[in-house]
Image (tube, coloured by chain):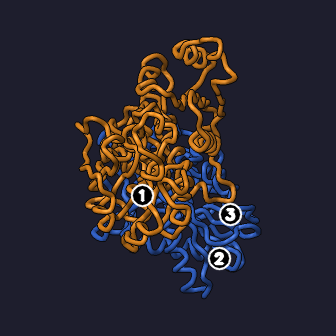
Chain colours: A orange, B blue
């Protein structure tokens, strides 16, 4: 695997392999010294054209726990302010000798363009309203720890602003790839005009689907969207689509509540529910580091060619690998 | 071409001897921790602990160590982690016996030595292997050896254990050689250690 640009590029096997790897890194992150020398000497640049706290810190933590060197890049203090183009910026950074770029950009597809321009591995950390693949992977890791390895038949609702959400797209693709039955729940104004290619069903009525769910995944209502007249009011939204205490009481006892953060408490989710026993929201954040370690390790640690048959996979005990000098 | 080096009985005897040597060398088993390297080393460590409990009456703690992220060939080829590192006791001040199935280049053990520094500071680290097949690339030597086996570099030494290879597998050690290969390289015998090995 050269880049991680979208969940749509991954097969079920790719996803499951990544999750198994992430489980190993989860163990690493729980050690007294949560750091391994696996990617010593590799240089990772975090290139964020949009604001982010958790994703950026999560990636940088992941890289450091793999012993990478991390270079931060923030638009506000860079030559982008002087009008430097994206292409010039990434080519300049690449010339310094880097191995991977973790990139967030407001334009959908920007990471794909950058992948054409430079040789480094590109990890999409969110591109516009398109995809946020590592969020989907960390959500899967969290689900897997509660529901078991496969999601076959699990009923998952993704609720909220689907239209503007890169998390919704990546999650819907990822959950469905592992066999889950995904329903998007939103007012018509917050759904894309076409859902062609989305492996989902759609509902406009949260109360109708609530009682059957194994997982309810709430998206952030982006307050700035109010100006676009897509919502009558936040209060109206909460009344129909918010996970209130009352609604949470109608969930199944073992149902899980998820949210990618940052939360608007009292809008899409009640504070009591976010901190309640069904919530796995803080686990999602913790799993983010392990998943991003797995992604970086998979991209940067898989051999220069990246094209190696399964017969050549090296086990750590190493004595049983054809022709390899191990031991 | 395949030849069977050890059958199940040979393997059992080797376990028994190594277990006795470990206890003799360390004047008992009280401070000993057995740490197996994935995958087969973990199974072998459990077997050794069972044998030691049988004759010494001491339950030796058994751990498992994954060295994947400490290897020096990451990025030369895909290196997959094989399982969670789990060492049930604080190893500081104890004797840690690393256990692996086959000792070859020594690079796995080098990685293991790095990995275990993060678990604490053992009083001593010793190495037990079922097979020493020679061709070391690093200055590493085993303290306890089941079988010194001369091999060609291109050969493949396979340890079979029911725990790791499925219930239909018979315990044993096999040497697989490419058909034209001749066994020429001799393994240097390990120098005596503590009068027992």
Q: Quadrant of the N terminus of chain A?
A: top left
> Circle 2 is placed at which residue position?
B23
Please report the residue visible at 53 percent of the width from the left and 68 percent of the height from the top.
A276
> Circle 3 is placed at which residue position?
B193
Q: Is residue A80 left or right of residue A143?
A: right
Q: Nearer the viewer, mark 1 or mark 2?
A: 1
Is residue A5 or residue A121 the one in the foreground? Answer: A5
Neighbour class for label 1 at 10 Å: few (<14), some, many (≥20)? few
Q: Give the CA distance from mark 3 to mark 2.
A: 13 Å
In the rendered image, is residue B151 in sight?
A: no
Residue A237, compared with residue A39, is above or below; it is: below
> Circle 1 is placed at which residue position?
A239
Determine the chain carrying the residue at label 2.
B
Please report the residue visible at 67 percent of the width from the left and 73 percent of the height from the top.
B32
Q: Secondary structure at mark 3?
A: loop
Asked if labels 1 and 2 share a chain, the reply is: no
Determine the chain carrying the residue at label 1.
A
Residue B110, compared with residue B191, is above or below; it is: above
Neighbour class for label 2 at 10 Å: few (<14), some, many (≥20)? some
| Percent x, y of residue A2 | 42, 30
């Amino acid at each position: 695997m050269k880049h991680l640009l979208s969940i749509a590029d991954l097969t079920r096997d790719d996803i499951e392999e990544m999750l198994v790897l992430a489980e190993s890194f989860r163990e690493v992150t729980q050690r007294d010294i949560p750091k391994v020398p696996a990617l010593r000497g590799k240089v990772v640049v975090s290139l964020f054209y949009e604001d982010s706290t958790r994703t950026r810190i999560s990636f940088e933590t992941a890289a450091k726990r793999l012993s990478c060197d991390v270079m931060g890049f923030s638009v506000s203090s860079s030559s982008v302010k002087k009008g430097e183009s994206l292409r010039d910026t990434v080519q300049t950074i690449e010339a310094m000798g880097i191995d991977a770029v973790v990139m967030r950009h407001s334009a959908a597809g920007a990471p794909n363009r950058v992948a054409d321009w430079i040789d480094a591995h590109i990890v999409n950390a969110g591109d516009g309203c398109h995809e946020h693949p590592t969020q989907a992977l960390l959500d899967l890791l969290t689900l897997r720890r509660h529901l078991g390895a496969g999601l076959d038949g699990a009923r998952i609702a993704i609720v909220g602003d689907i239209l503007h959400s890169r998390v919704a797209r990546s999650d819907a693709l990822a959950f469905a790839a592992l066999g889950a039955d995904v329903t998007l729940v939103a007012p018509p104004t917050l759904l894309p005009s076409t859902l062609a290619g989305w492996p989902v069903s759609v509902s406009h009525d949260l109360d109708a689907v609530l009682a059957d769910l194994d997982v309810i995944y709430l998206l952030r209502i982006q307050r700035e969207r109010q100006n676009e007249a897509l919502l009558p009011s936040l209060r109206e939204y909460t009344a129909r689509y918010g996970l209130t205490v009352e609604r949470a009481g109608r969930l199944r006892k073992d149902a899980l509540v998820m949210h990618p953060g940052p939360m608007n408490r009292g809008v899409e989710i009640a504070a009591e529910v976010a901190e309640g026993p069904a919530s796995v929201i803080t686990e999602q954040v913790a799993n983010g580091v392990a998943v991003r370690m797995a992604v970086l390790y998979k991209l940067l640690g898989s051999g220069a060619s990246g094209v190696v048959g399964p017969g050549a996979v090296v086990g750590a005990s190493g004595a049983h690998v054809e022709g390899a000098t191990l031991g | 071409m395949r030849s069977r080096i050890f059958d199940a009985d040979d393997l059992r005897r080797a376990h028994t001897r190594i277990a006795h040597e470990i206890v003799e060398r360390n004047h008992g088993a009280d401070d000993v921790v057995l740490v197996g390297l994935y995958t087969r080393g973990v199974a072998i460590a459990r077997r050794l602990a069972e044998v030691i409990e049988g004759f010494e009456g001491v339950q030796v703690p058994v751990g498992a160590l994954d060295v994947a992220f400490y290897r020096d060939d990451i990025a030369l080829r895909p290196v997959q982690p094989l399982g969670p590192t789990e060492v049930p006791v604080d190893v500081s001040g104890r004797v840690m016996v690393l256990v692996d199935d086959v000792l070859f280049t020594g690079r796995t053990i080098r990685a293991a030595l790095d990995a275990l520094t993060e678990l604490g500071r053992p009083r001593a680290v010793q190495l037990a292997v079922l097979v020493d097949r020679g061709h070391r690339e690093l200055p590493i030597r085993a303290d306890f050896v089941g079988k010194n086996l001369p091999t060609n570099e291109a050969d493949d030494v396979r340890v079979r254990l029911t725990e790791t290879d499925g219930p239909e597998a018979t315990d044993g050690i096999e040497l697989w050689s490419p058909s034209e290969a001749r066994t020429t390289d001799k393994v240097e015998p390990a120098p005596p250690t503590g009068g027992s090995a």
